[in-house]
Amino acid sequence: MLFTPKDFGTGIFELDGISKKTVEEHLKLYNGYVNKSNEVMEKLPKVDLSTANQVFSDARALKVELSFAVGGMQNHEIYFSHLKKNGGEPQGELRKQIEKDFGSVEQYLKDLKASGLSARGWAWTVWFPAVGKLVNWVGDSQNTYLSWDLKPLLALDVYEHAYLLDHGVNRGAYIDAFLKNLDWDRIGDSYSKARK
Ligand SMILES: [Fe+2]
């Protein structure tokens, strides 16, 4: 097995506004991405390369879905890693950079919420080295709109499975809950690593 599901601790089952049941079901989807990442990686070396074709071929199917499976696994690993009840607010160098790039923490969170409402899959806060800024980025799927040099710090899952049980189709209410359950120490660590 190349990939094994990560343990995110018990804190992710004690959030405000995101129920234990939602997290339990969501983890099942995460485990599915881990399993499929392993399955595709195992099948890739055995694929018949002589039949490679852009309309349909086993090579195309495996290579396209590898990006989907691994993207799904890694997006969820960021998401579950930084969920924590009463996570506080951005601090230190991360806070300074947020204030520089967005004007204030309040404006940054407003932008992040709007990004989550604009996406069909994910919104990420990324460190964008090419321009030296924090940017809230969107993706419509596990593997769309990514850029090679982005360093993701925060991942907001806006697929309906993340909130339907708790908030119906009121995604805004879910995003408000998500923002109250973020471990900013952890996100600050990710920011420090991204800047090295
Ligand atoms: Fe998800």
Image (tube, rainbow, N blue to C red):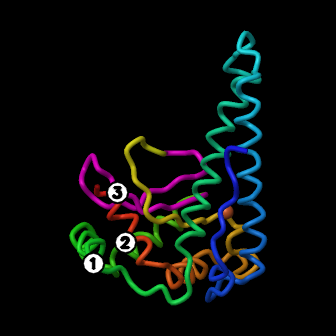
Q: Read off the residue under disc 1.
A: 92
Question: Of the residues shown, which amino acid type is indicated by label 2?
Answer: Gly
Q: Is residue 163 left or right of residue 172?
A: right
Task: Specify the quadrant of the image occupied by residue 53.
Answer: top right
Label 2 sits on a secondary structure element that is helix
Q: Residues within 10 Å of mark 3 (few under 14, many from 20)?
A: some
Question: Which is more N-terminal, label 2 or label 3?
Answer: 2
- Closer-to-camera residue (170/56): 56
Mark 3, ligand 1, within 8 Å: the answer is no
Local crowd at mark 1 within 10 Å, few (<14), some, or many (≥20)? few
Dot 3 amino acid type? Ala
Rounded to the nearest angstrom, the CA distance separating label 1 from label 3 is 15 Å
Tell me where residue 12 appears, x and y as whole percent. Answer: 64, 79
Of callouts 2 and 1, which one flags the residue occurring earlier in the amino acid sequence?
1
Q: Which quadrant of the figure contains the C terminus?
A: bottom left
For marks 2 and 1, give the CA distance.
8 Å
Q: Are marks 2 and 1 in contact (CB under 8 Å)?
A: yes
Magenta part of the protein: which range?
A: 121-145
Q: Dividing the image into four quarters, tell me where ligand 1 lies.
A: bottom right
Q: Is residue 143 magenta?
A: yes
Q: Depth check: 132 or 47 in front?
A: 47
* Residue 21 in the figure: left or right of residue 110: right
Position in image of residue 165 (x %, y %)? 76, 78
Residue pointed to by mark 3? 194
